[in-house]
Amino acid sequence: ELKVEQNPLFLSMQEGKNYTIYCNYSTTSDRLYWYRQDPGKSLESLFVLLSNGAVKQEGRLMASLDTKARLSTLHITAAVHDLSATYFCAVESYDKLIFGTGTRLQVFP
Amino acid sequence: DVKVTQSSRYLVKRTGEKVFLECVQDMDHENMFWYRQDPGLGLRLIYFSYDVKMKEKGDIPEGYSVSREKKERFSLILESASTNQTSMYLCASSLLSREAFFGQGTRLTVV
């Protein structure tokens, strides 16, 4: 059974600081996705990572995938308040799309 | 833009009722998914479908069934609603090996 674990579950960080969210998964897969969810809203796609070593960047967020280690990271650079949201990773395996528990990020001044 | 539409934003049903949650997508996606989202548990996959009339169980299918008679529509059915099925339900669709697009969610309360 595919399991996807994220850590930390909750992250409170000061504006301007850097931090990394980790996503580990239990079975072979080379397709991983990152999503953002704002309170009361649905999920919005951030990144699609489709091969080992894939790296994608958008603004202050950068995602990477290491399929050998079964690990993806979402790195936040110089956080700003607008990044406050819950971030989910999701792994695809045999057409199933399984999500991690999410990381709730709060950025304060 | 991809649009995934769920029939209701909020729903209140009584214990034992049969409940239908409808989801429609307009981008000819093969895959469709139903998840429930609960605090601290993330999104858990209930059922998914990769083609018309095809369905596969996810991680928590007990108490639910699904129907996909047309490519654009994927219905989630609670045969006899119970209070532990109170949750946010999210529908999503995708092309094969592409990111999923989500509907706005249905917050179901079973009383």
Image (cartoon, rainbow, N blue to C red):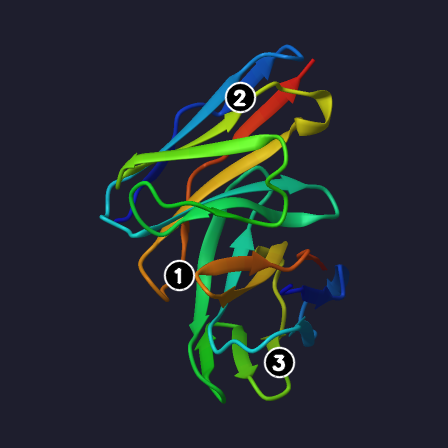
Q: Quadrant of residue B60?
A: top right
Image position of A9 (left or right of B34):
right
Instruction: Report how far apart the C-alphas of labels 2 and 1 lie in the structure.
Output: 26 Å
Q: Residue A98: x, y in percent?
A: 56, 58
Asked if badges 3 and 2 are on one and the same chain, I answer no
Q: Chain of mark 1?
A: B
Residue lying at 61% horizontally and 63% vertically, measured from the top left: A80
Please tell me which residue lies in front, A11 or A35: A35
Please tell me which residue lies in front, A7 or A1: A1
Seen in the picture, residue A78 relative to A37 is either above or below; the reply is below
Q: Secondary structure at mark 1?
A: loop
Instruction: Report how far apart the C-alphas of labels 3 and 2 lie in the structure.
Output: 38 Å
Q: Residue B42: x, y in percent?
A: 66, 50
Q: Chain of mark 2?
A: B
Q: Secondary structure at mark 3?
A: loop
The amino acid on which the numbered mark 2 sits, given as a three-letter code, is Tyr
Numbered mark located on residue B10 in the image:
2
The amino acid on which the numbered mark 3 sits, given as a three-letter code, is Arg
Q: Earlier in the sequence, mark 2 or mark 1?
A: 2
Numbered mark located on residue B99 in the image:
1
Q: Quadrant of the C terminus of chain A?
A: bottom right
Asked if badges 1 and 3 are on one and the same chain, I answer no
Q: Residue A103: x, y in percent?
A: 69, 59
Seen in the picture, residue B19 relative to B67 is either above or below; the reply is above
The amino acid on which the numbered mark 1 sits, given as a three-letter code, is Glu
Q: Chain of mark 3?
A: A
Residue B30 visible (yes or no): yes
Label 3, on which residue? A70
Seen in the picture, residue B72 relative to A105 is either above or below; the reply is above
Residue lying at 57% horizontally and 86% vertically, measured from the top left: A66
Residue lying at 46% horizontally and 22% vertically, measured from the top left: B20
